[in-house]
Image (cartoon, helix red, strand yellow):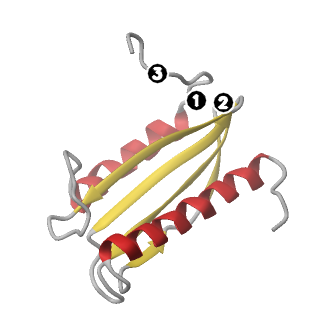
Amino acid sequence: MARATGERAALQAHVDDFLQSFRSDRRIGCGAEYVVTPEPTRFVDAPGGLLVHYGFAGSPKAGAAPTERTIQWAGLRGDNLVLISVSAYEPTSCVESGSEGTLANLEDVEPRLRQLVEANALPAEVGPPAGL
């Protein structure tokens, strides 16, 4: 495979790797029938630079209602790939969840979250929180 060049190509390569990783993971952890359906990939000219918005919905089998959903934004800032990620799981999901909400919760907050992320710059420098 040819190496991706340019910011947009690098971000698209990240999206492709992310989705393939989840397909492989869910096939192992949730069964061979599990379906990972990608959301449309959308590039955004945001303050501070280019972002890509992407994600997926996961279902126990073809035609079944989704039981998980993840949405993400990614941007290259200097030498760092900066991510904002939100996941939601139904109680019937094959994925153990912690304090994440349900798909309905994510649907409720997604429009405002999209506005906030895409109207503001991602941090230019990324590191561990102070005190760690």
Local crowd size for mark 3, using a 10 Å CA cut-off: few (<14), some (14–19), many (≥20): few
Chain-order first, disc 2 or disc 1: 2
Which residue is painted at 22% across and 58% down in the image? 96
**In front of the other: 128 or 62:** 128
**Residue 13 x/y as whole percent:** 69, 58
**In front of the other: 73 or 110:** 73
Q: Label 3, label 1: how many angstroms apart (C-alpha)?
A: 19 Å
Name which quarter of the figure residue 92 lies in.
Answer: bottom left
What kind of residue is marked 1?
Answer: Ala
Do labels 2 and 1 touch, CB within 8 Å? yes
Q: Which residue is mark 3?
A: 128
Question: Dot 3 lies on which element?
Answer: loop
**Residue 114 x/y as whole percent:** 45, 46
Chain-order first, disc 3 or disc 2: 2
Q: Which residue is mark 1?
A: 121
Q: Label 2, label 1: how many angstroms apart (C-alpha)?
A: 5 Å
What kind of residue is marked 3?
Answer: Pro
Q: Which residue is mark 2?
A: 48
**Residue 36 x/y as whole percent:** 43, 74
Q: Label 3, label 2: how many angstroms apart (C-alpha)?
A: 21 Å
Placement of 84 over or under 38, stated as above or below: above
Placement of 23 over or under 9, stated as above or below: below
Local crowd size for mark 1, using a 10 Å CA cut-off: few (<14), some (14–19), many (≥20): some
What kind of residue is marked 2?
Answer: Gly
Looking at the image, is mark 3 or mark 1 nearer the viewer? 3
Placement of 108 over or under 122, stated as above or below: below
Placement of 46 over or under 66, stated as above or below: above
